[in-house]
Image (cartoon, rainbow, N blue to C red):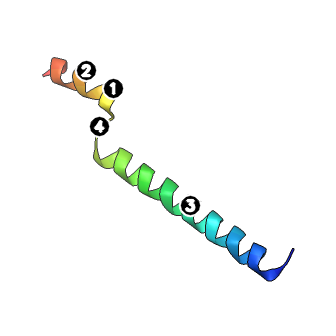
Amino acid sequence: MNKNQKIFRWVLILFTLLMVALAIDMAKNTTAPWNKKKVEKGR
């Protein structure tokens, strides 16, 4: 594996981890679309 492939792989891993972290953060702050109807009925 040459240097460019190694750098590309690390960037890809970091980008994936960042996206996963953002998705988890957003999921904690908002209700999922399939849960909104249940929440509104519960009030």
Please name the residue that numbered disc 4 is placed on: 31
Residue of label 3: 17
Label 2 residue SS: helix
Question: Amino acid under label 3?
Answer: Leu
Q: CA distance from mark 1 to mark 2?
A: 8 Å
Q: CA distance from mark 2 to mark 3?
A: 31 Å
Residue at the image point whose x is 33% and y is 26% from the top: 34
Q: Quadrant of residue 16?
A: bottom right
Dot 1 corresponds to which residue?
34
Q: Residues within 10 Å of mark 3 (few under 14, many from 20)?
A: few
Q: Position of residue 29 (x, y in %)?
A: 29, 48
The quadrant of the picture occupied by the N terminus is bottom right
Residue at image location 23% in from the left, 22% down from the top:
37
Residue 28 on image: x %, y % = 35, 47
Give the secondary structure at mark 1: helix
Please tell me which residue lies in front, 28 or 15.
Answer: 15
Horizontal arrangement in the rendering, residue 24 relative to residue 12 (left or right): left
| Dot in front, 1 or 2 | 1
> In this figure, which residue is indicated by the disc labeled 2?
38
Quadrant location of the C terminus in the rendered image: top left
Label 1, residues with CA under 10 Å away: few <14, some 14-19, many ≥20: few
In-image side of 40 versus 4 (left or right): left
Q: Amino acid at mark 4?
A: Thr
Q: Residue furthest left?
A: 43
- Regarding mark 3 in the picture, which secondary structure is present there? helix
Q: Is residue 23 left or right of residue 12?
A: left
Residue 30 in picture, x, y percent from top left: 28, 43
Identity of the amino acid at label 1?
Answer: Trp
Gap between marks 3 and 1, in whole Å? 25 Å
Q: Earlier in the sequence, mark 4 or mark 2?
A: 4
